[in-house]
Amino acid sequence: MTDINLDRARYNMIEQQIRPWDVLDPRVLDVIANTPRERFVPKEYQNLAFTDTEIPLAHGQSMLEPKLEGRILQALQIKPTDRILEIGTGSGYLTACLGKLGGSVVSVDIYPEFSQQAQQQIAGLGLENIEFRVGDAACGWQQDGEFDVIVITGSLPMPQPAFQESLTIGGRMFVVIGDKLLMEAQRIVRVSADACSTESLFETHLPNLINAMKPQAFEF
């Protein structure tokens, strides 16, 4: 793609995919417009960088659709001082957007390859407020304390209270709960030390977070 084509493709992505999905927050749209999504797409899928589709990554994983990334960023109402935890680094594109919107980011992935590649791409953007971790965070991530925002980029078949316990009071979390075709995107807010409120955002479908706990099957 030439630079002109990249600019046009990015503009069309925002106007034809992201805005129609009710992503209207000016800060979110500005970050998406100014973060080079094509930089984080595998070379063999460069022609799909701005399309309304999940882009394949290694290990059977995928990059989220642009409209879903926009809804996630908007739902969390990220402030410039927020400390953010991302579970599932993946391509690193959403990580970069989080870093631009918030104060600091800790991004965790089970695959060292994803963490290393994302770190290299993000370093080229001059973002210095992002730390990368390699580990299994399917049941929570307590190693780095509490966070104002938590983003889980794979679905959970059942809620994991450990994530909510890692939220500060007033902290927000985006998570997709459910299994197979019955999944719901939720915004969870920790309203007190022992209570959270849950808002249903929309129906969607995401692959399960690797090693995510599943409800025990009922046996007759």
Image (cartoon, rainbow, N blue to C red):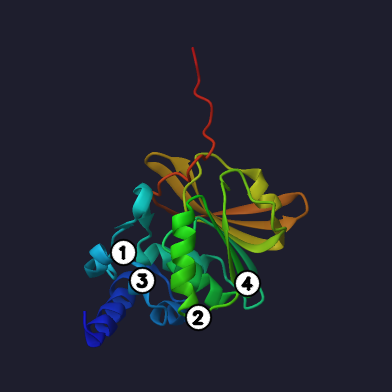
The local crowd at label 4, few if under 14, some if 14 to 19, many if 20 or more residues have their Cα within 10 Å, is many
CA–CA distance in space, label 4 to label 1:
26 Å
Q: Position of residue 45 (x, y in %)?
A: 25, 64
Residue 42 image label: 1
Q: Residue at x 37, y 48 (%)?
A: 59
Depicted 134 relative to depicted 218: above or below? below
Q: Quadrant of the N terminus?
A: bottom left
Q: Which residue is mark 3?
A: 18
Q: Position of residue 7 (x, y in %)?
A: 28, 84
Count of numbered badges drawn on the protein: 4
173 or 154, nearer to the observer: 154
CA–CA distance in space, label 4 to label 2:
17 Å
Q: Position of residue 58 (x, y in %)?
A: 35, 53
CA–CA distance in space, label 4 to label 3:
25 Å
- Residue most toward the right? 193
Residue 128 image label: none
Q: Is residue 78 left or right of residue 201?
A: right
